[in-house]
Image: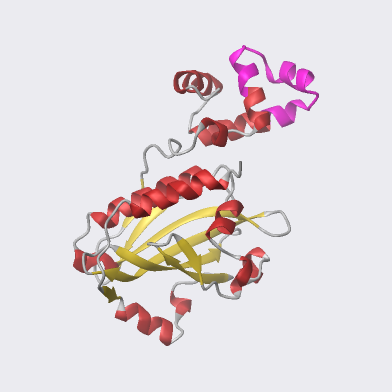
């Protein structure tokens, strides 16, 4: 099974659990910025922009900057392609962030929907195989008569040199005098993935042996890999599950049936 298919379904669910009207309202102020080509106000270094159709859960109209940032031509990019490039550790956080974004905008008065920019970072895989950390900034450019978001514009800027490590950080940036909410806490960020999507096959092997009480050295010998490789997988699992040590990882895995 394509690991991105269940994630695509989750994205569909996050943005389609709402009813839409027919009449469209446009963010005229931001459209003016587009027409005047002043995107530099939102960009940091190498960047590209794209449009997101919320009703159809689709990304389109990628700019040529995708070549500089990710090595892909604009016409190679899509929602499915973007999801396939997200770092496995960042993916569940990205999904949870999108759920939080929907929750935030659903609680806003209709007249304030155009007055917020969403910002968070995550890693995308470059065509050459390495990962690029992008800062994603999203603004609403169209809503319907009920205030449901219909279309957004996103900008991805390469911030690899500015942020070397760490999980994505979500912020809601207020425009036109609205308050800003930085480093928003997102709960349950790993609950969106099934166990088979959370860990790689090798991680499952190592986790099962950790549950049996085996050390990294013992696991390395049994799997014919280095102790350093085992420790790397252990660190990745701790990060994926947002736990501090192996005891917490083992306890949570058994409690939630992840193995």
In the depicted structure, whether residue 176 falls above or below residue 18: below
Identified at 59% across, 48% down, the residue is 87
Residue 188, position as x, y percentages in the image: 39, 37
Quadrant in the rendering for residue 212: top right
In the depicted structure, whether residue 53 falls above or below residue 189: below
Horizontal side of 231 relative to 184 (left or right) equals right
Residue 149, position as x, y percentages in the image: 31, 64
Viewer-proximal residue among 174 and 60: 60
Residue 33, position as x, y percentages in the image: 39, 82
Task: Tell me if I can see residue 163 in this picture.
Answer: no
Horizontal side of 193 relative to 232 (left or right) equals left
Residue 23, position as x, y percentages in the image: 25, 73
Locate the N terminus by quadrant. Answer: top right
Identified at 60% across, 32% down, the residue is 235
In the depicted structure, whether residue 124 falls above or below residue 175: above
Horizontal side of 135 relative to 229 (left or right) equals left
Task: Tell me if I can see residue 236 in this picture.
Answer: yes
In the depicted structure, whether residue 241 falls above or below residue 40: above
Locate the C terminus by quadrant. Answer: top right
Q: How is the image coloured?
A: secondary structure
- Name of the residue lying farthest toward the right: 224
- Name of the residue lying farthest toward the bottom: 36
Identified at 52% across, 73% down, the residue is 61
Quadrant in the rendering for residue 15: bottom left
Viewer-proximal residue among 39 and 153: 153
Magenta residues: mostly which secondary structure?
helix
Q: Which residues are magenta?
A: 207-231
Q: Is residue 205 magenta?
A: no
Identified at 34% across, 66% down, the residue is 150
Quadrant in the rendering for residue 76: bottom right
The count of marks equals 0
């Amino acid at each position: 099974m394509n690991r991105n298919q269940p994630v695509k379904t989750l994205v569909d669910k996050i943005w389609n659990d709402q009813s839409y009207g027919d009449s469209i309202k446009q963010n005229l102020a931001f459209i003016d910025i587009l027409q005047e080509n002043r995107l530099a106000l939102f960009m940091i270094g190498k960047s590209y922009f794209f449009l997101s159709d919320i009703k159809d859960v689709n990304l389109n109209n990628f700019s040529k900057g995708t070549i500089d940032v990710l090595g892909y031509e604009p016409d190679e990019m899509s929602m499915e392609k973007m999801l396939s490039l997200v770092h496995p550790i960042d993916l569940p956080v990205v999904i949870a962030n999108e759920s939080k974004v929907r929750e935030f905008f659903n609680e806003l008065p209709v007249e304030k929907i155009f007055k917020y920019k969403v910002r968070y970072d995550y890693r995308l895989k470059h065509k050459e195989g390495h990962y690029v950390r992008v800062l994603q900034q999203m603004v609403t450019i169209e809503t319907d008569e009920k205030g449901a978001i219909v279309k957004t514009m996103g900008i991805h800027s390469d911030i690899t040199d500015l942020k070397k490590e760490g999980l994505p950080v979500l912020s809601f940036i207020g425009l036109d005098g609205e308050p800003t909410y930085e480093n928003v806490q997102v709960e349950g960020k790993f609950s969106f993935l099934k166990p088979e999507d959370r860990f790689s096959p090798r991680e499952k092997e190592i986790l099962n042996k950790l549950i049996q009480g085996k050390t990294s050295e013992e696991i390395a010998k049994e799997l014919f890999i280095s102790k350093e490789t085992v420790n790397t997988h252990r660190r990745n699992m701790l990060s994926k599950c947002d736990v501090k040590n192996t005891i917490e990882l083992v306890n949570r895995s058994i409690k939630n049936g992840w193995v």
